[in-house]
Image (cartoon, rainbow, N blue to C red):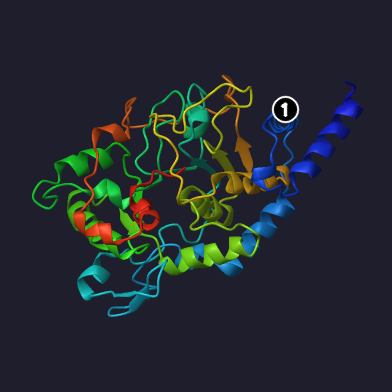
């Protein structure tokens, strides 16, 4: 194919994927072939699209002001509404004193951000070095880290409240402390006010970790921010019970970062060559059927990639990377979910299964 024809082909593919196609209508054979062709085209970053998305997200959701609960945006005795219900929780003085004074990343853009999902497409990807060279790295649900495929650097990591079901945590904090210390001085973010049954677990973890690991801040998602994100994407046709934590934080990154690179977000059971892959790169668990519409989220990520608003990485990374690898105080570690299996409290049985699943689902 001549260079001119290749440019025309690439332009046509970008236009095609810039239009949302319902995931249920995807023909995987033609879809993966055309997507492979698109990924082989030169990537065209689009500053206008990035700025437009940033402005839209700032206007609707304002991550800088309301992404997490802080002493600045939350008052003592303020009643905050849960993300998924009209129930409220009153912030007492003790909890308020443990919140960060202000948003920790205000006053600056975060540069090049790597948002690292847990998709099996990262297995044997050799993307670790590329991820570690990002300015800011976001990971999810205490996912395994290793220097080969997913890297070691972590600046922000989510914890699912189900991962906090330790017996006598306040008396025996070592297992949790050891687990989070794998991620160095990264901030830990927890959805403490997604559902009522997540709150006590999250506050207990904050109380335990704050004095032992003050260099590793524990913060809570603001439920009002997550409700705003939900409205934003519902207004753009994304209908699901709840956004995945991965999609939430990609949205946050689009507002806070100059350049967003997304890894490990692939909701299908086979890769671009049709080879079977696990749902997660670190275990063999099956996807949860209740909570998230991962394929529908993915086609929106693909639209953003086609428009030049972010970079979606779905192929093995090049062995050549033009930037020096930063020094890390972490050794090569593999730390997965299999070391701890939470026990479901009997009191949670009164909640519908699809609601309980939020605190027990590992999301991309």
Which residue position holds label 1? 33
Report if residue 216 is visible in the image: no
Front residue of 267/144: it is 267
Q: What residue occupies the far left of the structure in this picture?
A: 171
Q: Quadrant of the N terminus?
A: top right
Residue 98 is left or right of residue 8, and the answer is: left
Report if residue 308 is visible in the image: yes
- Where on the picture, by quarter, is residue 256? bottom right
User: Label 1 neighbourhood size at 10 Å, few (<14), some (14-19), many (20+)?
Assistant: few
**Residue 27, percent from left and from top:** 70, 35
- Where on the picture, by quarter, is residue 38? top right
Residue found at x 38% / y 69%: 82
**Residue 360, percent from left and from top:** 33, 48
**Residue 11, percent from left and from top:** 83, 38
Front residue of 346/17: it is 346
Residue 228 is left or right of residue 331, and the answer is: right
Q: Considering only vertical position in the picture, is 85 above or below 333?
A: below
**Residue 220, percent from left and from top:** 35, 60
């Amino acid at each position: 194919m001549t260079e001119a024809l290749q440019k025309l082909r690439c332009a046509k593919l970008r236009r095609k994927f810039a239009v949302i196609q319902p995931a249920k209508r995807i023909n995987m054979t033609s879809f993966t072939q055309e997507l492979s062709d698109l990924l082989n085209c030169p990537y065209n970053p689009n500053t206008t699209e990035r700025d437009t998305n940033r402005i839209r997200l700032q206007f609707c959701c304002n991550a800088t002001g309301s992404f997490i609960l802080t002493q600045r945006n939350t008052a003592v005795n303020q009643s905050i509404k849960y993300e998924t219900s009209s129930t409220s929780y009153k912030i007492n003085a003790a909890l308020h004193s443990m919140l960060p004074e202000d948003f920790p990343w205000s006053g600056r853009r975060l540069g090049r951000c790597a948002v690292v999902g847990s998709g099996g497409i990262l297995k044997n990807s050799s993307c670790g070095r590329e991820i570690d060279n990002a300015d800011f790295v976001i990971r999810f649900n205490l996912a395994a880290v290793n220097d080969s495929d997913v890297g070691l650097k972590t600046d922000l990591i989510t914890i699912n409240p189900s991962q906090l079901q330790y017996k006598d945590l306040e008396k025996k904090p070592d297992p949790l402390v050891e687990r989070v210390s794998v991620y160095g001085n990264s901030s830990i973010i927890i959805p403490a006010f997604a559902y009522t049954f997540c709150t006590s677990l999250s506050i207990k973890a904050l109380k335990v970790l704050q004095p032992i690991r003050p260099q590793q801040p524990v913060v809570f998602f603001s439920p009002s921010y997550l409700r705003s994100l939900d409205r934003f994407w519902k207004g753009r046709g994304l209908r699901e019970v709840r956004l995945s934590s991965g999609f939430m934080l990609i949205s946050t990154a689009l507002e806070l970062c100059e350049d967003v690179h997304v890894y490990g977000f692939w909701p299908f059971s086979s890769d671009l060559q049709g080879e079977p892959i696990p749902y997660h790169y670190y275990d063999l668990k099956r996807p949860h059927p209740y909570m998230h519409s991962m394929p529908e989220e993915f086609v929106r990520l693909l639209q953003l990639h086609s428009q030049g608003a972010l970079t979606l990485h779905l192929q093995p990374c090049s062995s050549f990377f033009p930037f020096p690898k930063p020094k890390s105080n972490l050794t090569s570690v593999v730390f997965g979910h299999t070391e701890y299996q939470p026990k479901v409290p009997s009191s949670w049985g009164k909640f519908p299964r699809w609601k309980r699943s939020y605190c027990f689902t590992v999301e991309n």
